[in-house]
Amino acid sequence: MVTNDLATAFLVVDRRRADRRTNAESLPDSLESTDDGMARRGPRRKQERRRQIDPTTCERDYSEDEVEFMRSMDEYKRKSGRQFPTWSEVLEVLYSMGYRKVAEPSELVMKSR
C-alpha cells in the first residue's frame, strides 16, 4: 500500500547499542561505565578561563608607551572584530592615541633586545 502521508515516508534507525562500551578498562578516566553498559561522563570540572597571552611578547619588559600601544591595539581589535588590522587601521589607532607627525623623518635606530 502506497501512502502520501509525509510522516510515514521516513524511517528512523537508531544504530546505538547498549553493549557498545561494556569494557570499563577501555574507557578514558573522565568516563564512567554504568549498569546499562553505556558510558557517562563524571561531573565537569570548572576550568579557569585562559588569558590570551602572546608567547612572543610574554618574556620582555615593555615601556609604558609600548604597553599603552598594545592595549589600544587590543581594544581596537576587540571592538572592530578584526584580528589582523591593516596598516591604515594601525595608523588610525595611533592617531586616536594622540600621535601626530611633528618632525621631519629621521633614520630608524634599532634597539638591541
Image (spheres, grey):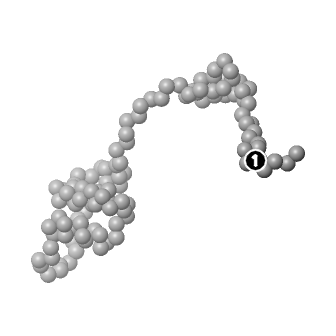
Regarding residue 110, the answer to whether it shows in the image is no
Percent of width and height locating residue 112: 25, 63
* Residue beneath disc 1: 5
Quadrant holding the C terminus: bottom left
Horizontal side, residue 98 vs residue 80: left or right: left
From this view, report whether residue 70 is shown above or below residue 10: below
Percent of width and height locating residue 111: 23, 65
| Residue found at x 36% / y 60% | 81
Percent of width and height locating residue 47: 41, 34
Quadrant holding the N terminus: top right
The residue nearer to you, when weighing 10 against 80, is 10
Q: Quadrant of residue 85?
A: bottom left
Q: Quadrant of residue 76?
A: bottom left
The residue nearer to you, when weighing 109 against 27, is 27
Q: Amino acid at mark 1?
A: Asp
The residue nearer to you, when weighing 13 against 35, is 13
Instruction: Residue lying at the far top in this picture: please name it.
Output: 35
How many discs mark residues in the rendered view?
1
Regarding residue 107, the answer to whether it shows in the image is yes
Q: Residues within 10 Å of mark 1 (few under 14, many from 20)?
A: few
Instruction: Residue lying at the far right in this picture: please name it.
Output: 1
